[in-house]
Amino acid sequence: MIIDPPLTPLAEVDEVLAGQGYAVLSAEALCQAMACRPVDLAPLAAYWDRLPADGYLRDGGRYRRRRHSCFIVEGGQVGAVAQRAHWQPLAYNALHGGIERHYEAIEPGLLAQPLWHRLLLTLAAHASALKGAQPWFVEAHPFRIDTTDGIGRPTPEGAHRDGVDLVSVTLVARVGVKGAETRVFEADGALGRRFTLGQLWSTLLLDDARVVHESTPIQPLDAAAGGHRDTLVLTFRSRGFQGLAAD
């Protein structure tokens, strides 16, 4: 069963995010904020077809492909930083935390797209509305979860936080699969919400200090044909990137 997400009008997103710890933007609302149309974003999806395999899956799976690049957003500018490892403490990722994971960088062609920069600036503005205007240290993760293993796990670590200030999850493609139900729970309470991101370019915003999140596994609608789900996860953190030497 597919449960439609609770969409938030753009004018209310910052208030809703601050009030309940999460908000969901439709593709139209995201594009309204970016001053573009959903069709303008469509060419970006081709870059997900060339994601390399994730060699760090500790469950032995082959279902995840990804890249990783980092940026600093400050003063209305997006600056790329030298390629660096992705690292999370075990407190936030019990499965893959505590190790440096070195992924291939996002392709230069995607980073050169004007809408890429506009997307980071748009979402950084919501981080600033939530936590105050400041430089944002952004990690970008294009993911493809497929059904190579029969099922694919968008969040093999389970319900989690990321150790940042704001997390965004944008649906880029959903082809021939069922599942991937998003679940958002209070970090310090019992309340939660579940729904399915189905509209391409719809975007979930999460106040990482207040909520934990996960997505259920995907399965193919046709086992012979297989399927996949593509997302772009962006994390916004103050005070620098997470790392072995970070606070």
Image: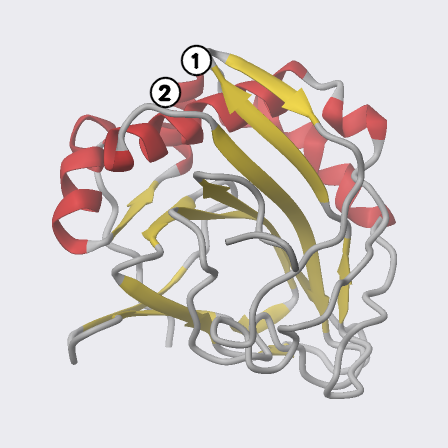
Name the residue nearer the viewer: 221 or 174. Answer: 174
- Residue 71 horizontal/vertical position (percent): 63, 31
Q: Amino acid at mark 2?
A: Gln
Q: Is residue 50 above or below residue 62?
A: above
Q: Callout 2: 10 Å neighbours few (<14), some, many (20+)?
A: few
Name the residue nearer the viewer: 211 or 199. Answer: 211
Q: Amino acid at mark 1?
A: Ala
Q: Quadrant of residue 220?
A: bottom right
Q: Check disc 1 and report the residue beneath it.
A: 35
What residue is rendered at 14% in x and 37% in y? 15
Labelled pair 1, 2 in contact (Cβ < 8 Å): yes
The colour mode here is: secondary structure
Name the residue nearer the viewer: 193 or 228. Answer: 193
- Residue 150 horizontal/vertical position (percent): 73, 86
What residue is rendered at 47% in x and 41% in y? 236
Query: What number is the disc on residue 32?
Result: 2
Q: Secondary structure at mark 1?
A: loop
- Residue 67 horizontal/vertical position (percent): 77, 50
